[in-house]
Image (spheres, rainbow, N blue to C red):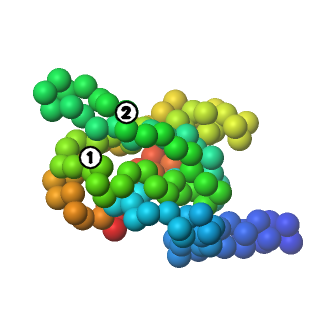
Amino acid sequence: MTLKAAHMSTSRLQHIKDYFLGGEYTSAEMAAPYCPLTTHVLNTGMGVPGAHVALSLHRMDPSTSLWNLLTTGTTNDDGRCPGLITRENITPAVYKMRFETGQYWGSLGESSFYPYVEIIFTITVHSQKFHVPLLCSRFSYTTYRGS
């Protein structure tokens, strides 16, 4: 392994470690109100946070089955998007997070099989904490309910 390859490997591992251990937060993020719904994006193809990914949060109207846009955001350098919704605004319902993955990969000079990813999930107990991460590469993605 060349010195450059070893450095890149170490750098990727450090990014992943920082990412999962929480990394550093800015003072604005530390001062942000408690958010019961959080997300983060991890670029698994490169082993780095998915920085600057545009996303939107929607709630389904049960009477019409139409999506109502609640908020939009962009992931920070750590791949996180703090402050999506306040505890007062979260209710038991079906929600959707839409991640603009095609734009993200395009900004890196890459193409992607998925122009966007939508994660649809149900919140039944609104007092709980919900973490919905997106792990993605150009040709695959996965998610899970974190804590």
Occupied quadrant, residue 30 = bottom right
Q: Residue furthest left?
A: 63
Q: Nearer the viewer, residue 105 or 21?
A: 21
Quadrant of residue 109 within the rendered picture? top right
Residue 68: image x %, image y %? 31, 31
Instruction: Locate residue 110 relative to residue 30 in the image: left or right.
Output: right
The N terminus - image quarter: bottom right
Relative to the observer, which residue lies in front, 141 or 102?
102
At horizontal 48% and vertical 33% (from top left) the residue drawn is 116
Q: Which mark is residue 121?
A: 1
- Find disc 2 in the rendering and name its residue: 69
Marks 2 and 1, the one that precedes in the sequence: 2
Residue name at image x 43 percent, y 40 percent: 71
Q: Residues within 10 Å of mark 1 (few under 14, many from 20)?
A: some
Secondary structure under tag 2 reads strand
Q: Position of residue 64 (x, y in %)?
A: 17, 23
Is residue 16 at least partly visible in the picture? no
The local secondary structure at tag 1 comes to strand
Residue 7 appearing in the image:
yes
Q: Is residue 67 left or right of residue 106?
A: left
Disc 2 residue type (three-letter):
Leu
Look at the picture and state if 67 lies above or below 118.
above
Three-letter amino acid code at the position of disc 1: Phe
Locate residue 32, reporting x and y percent. Answer: 50, 63
Residue nearer the viewer, 60 or 133: 60
Query: Could you tell me residue 147's position as x and y percent?
Result: 34, 68
